[in-house]
Image (tube, rainbow, N blue to C red):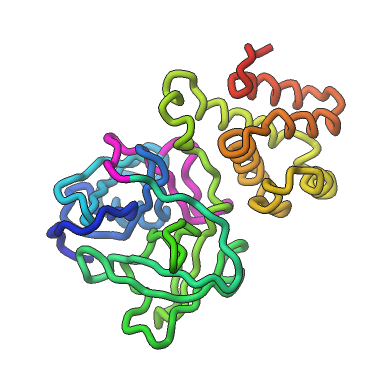
């Protein structure tokens, strides 16, 4: 736990999570849209410890931005569909809605590859952060889907308390690969939740300006939840058949063995928000569901996203 004294640096999408009084540091968060950030659920729990406020949807923490935005701070509330703690994948993540937008560009997500060189900015004892570098070595750790990061042995710093919730980024670029969530006692290895494992329940930048007016975020969530009732997604063999038929761009960013809601949420968000092919995905589902009642509910939920009236 560190006492805070912001200092101006180059603007960055990495933020700090403090207690409700803004006096003690508990970890980091990453800006993923102008009014949304992600962090670890356990960071939220620690920030609220002793406050009497239960951690989960509706709970609020404080964020600040010492790197380039001295004096900026925001209250950040866990969104209704943005809380995962131990019971379901991605196991330790929270999506926060800010009460005011951060005046910096959000992180651009990317898919990690085994062997990628990475760097992480954390807030253990340094108020404006310390860097560690390392390499993504593959899945492992305490939860299915976590990705191991081996810290460079030559580095002077290791992963310490205060790095939780930090963004794991490309070493030579700045793309966001995942969220650091665990580390060994020595700090020589850590684990991240890859970005593709975190359901994108926040609006994409492409459509954020109109999201509040047309209910796009709510439509994305409703569509994904409706998809979880489809036989095509519920049965592993049928889901794999659908996965093989998807556009290659979607296959590169999805895994057929993800938990059901994560798979559906990412499928809808990517198909609609990034590639504009949601209609093609729905056509594939139509062909497999053969007019099922569940598919009719999916079509109704997705109608606002396709520009057509529901029903």
Q: Is residue 180 visible?
A: no
Q: What residue do we see at 50% from left, 29% from top?
A: 217
In the displayed structure image, the side of residue 86 where residue 119 appears, left or right: left
Residue toward you, 165 or 137? 137
Residue 154: image location, x then y, percent: 39, 87
Task: Report the residue that reaches farthest toward the bottom.
Answer: 154
Q: Is residue 233 visible?
A: yes
Q: What residue do we see at 30% from left, 37% from top?
A: 101
Residue 129's place in the image compared with 238, above or below, is: below
Residue 238's place in the image compared with 49, above or below, is: above
Residue toward you, 256 or 68? 68
**Figure quadrant of the N terminus:** bottom left
> Is 222 contained in the magenta span?
no
Residue 116: image location, x then y, percent: 54, 70
Image quadrant in which you'd find residue 205: top left
| Range shown magenta | 79-104
Number of numbered discs present? 0
> Is 97 contained in the magenta span?
yes
In the displayed structure image, the side of residue 156 where residue 136 appears, left or right: right
Residue 165's place in the image compared with 250, above or below, is: below
Residue 221: image location, x then y, percent: 56, 32
Q: What residue do we see at 22% from left, 47% from top?
A: 20
Residue 309's place in the image compared with 302, above or below, is: above
Residue 212: image location, x then y, percent: 42, 23
In the displayed structure image, the side of residue 47 where residue 42 appears, left or right: right
**Figure quadrant of the C terminus:** top right
């Amino acid at each position: 736990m560190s006492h805070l004294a912001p200092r101006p640096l180059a603007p960055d999408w990495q933020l700090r999570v403090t207690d409700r009084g803004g006096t003690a540091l508990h970890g980091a968060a990453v800006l993923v849209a102008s009014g949304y950030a992600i962090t670890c659920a356990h960071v939220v729990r620690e920030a609220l410890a002793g406050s009497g406020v239960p951690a989960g949807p509706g709970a609020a923490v404080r964020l600040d931005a010492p790197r380039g935005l001295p004096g900026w701070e925001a209250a950040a509330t866990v969104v209704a569909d943005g809380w995962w703690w131990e019971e379901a994948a991605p196991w330790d993540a929270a999506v926060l809605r800010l009460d005011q937008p951060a005046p910096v560009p959000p992180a651009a997500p990317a898919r990690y590859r085994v062997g990628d060189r990475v760097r992480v900015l954390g807030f253990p004892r340094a108020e404006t952060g310390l860097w560690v570098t390392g390499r993504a070595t593959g899945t492992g750790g305490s939860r299915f889907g976590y990705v191991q990061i081996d810290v460079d042995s030559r580095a002077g710093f290791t992963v310490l308390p205060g790095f939780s919730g930090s963004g794991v980024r490309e070493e030579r670029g700045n793309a966001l690969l995942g969220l650091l969530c665990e580390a060994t006692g020595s700090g020589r290895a850590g684990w991240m939740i890859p970005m593709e494992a975190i359901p994108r329940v926040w609006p994409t930048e492409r459509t954020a300006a109109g999201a509040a007016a047309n209910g796009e975020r709510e439509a994305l969530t409703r569509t994904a939840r409706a998809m979880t009732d489809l036989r095509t997604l519920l049965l592993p063999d049928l889901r794999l058949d659908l996965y093989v038929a998807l556009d290659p761009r979607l296959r590169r960013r999805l895994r057929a063995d993800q938990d059901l809601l994560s798979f559906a949420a990412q499928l809808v968000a990517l198909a609609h928000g990034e590639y504009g092919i949601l209609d093609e995905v729905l056509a594939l589902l139509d062909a497999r569901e053969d007019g099922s009642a569940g598919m009719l509910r999916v079509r109704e939920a997705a109608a606002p996203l396709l520009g057509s009236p529901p029903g």
